[in-house]
Image: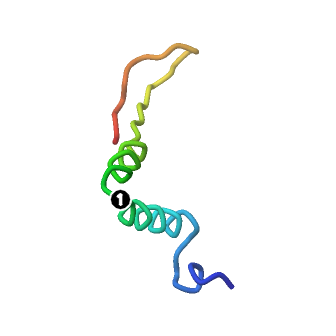
Amino acid sequence: MAAWRAAGLNYINYSNIAARLLRQALKPDLRTQAIRRDESHIKFTKWQGGKPEKVVSEAK
């Protein structure tokens, strides 16, 4: 059994923790580049009748 599963984590949680630790271990100049790549933006749009109506919410 995988150690992350034995610890009660799912793969997504394990992967997020490992990625965060890796970014913290990088040299400062590489760390800022890696942190910038980690940012994501999600936009939800309500669709009705095959056409977008309006933005419902935005998350980061």
Three-letter amino acid code at disc 1?
Lys
Residue 32, given in percent of the width and then of the height, sits at: 32, 48
Residue at 36% from the left image edge and 43% from the top image edge = 36
- Residue 10: percent from the left, percent from the top? 56, 71
Q: Residues within 10 Å of mark 1 (few under 14, many from 20)?
A: few
Does 57 sit above or below residue 28?
A: above
* Residue under the point 41% across and 47% down: 38
Q: Nearer the viewer, residue 37 or 1?
A: 37
SS at mark 1? loop
**Quadrant in which the C terminus appears:** top left
Q: Is residue 24 left or right of residue 50?
A: left
Residue that label 1 marks: 27
Whether 53 is drawn above or below 4: the answer is above
Q: Is residue 35 shown above or below 48?
A: below
Give how far across and how far down residue 56 sits, in percent. 36, 29
Identity of the residue drawn at 44% across and 68% down? 17
Give the x, y percent position of residue 12: 54, 63
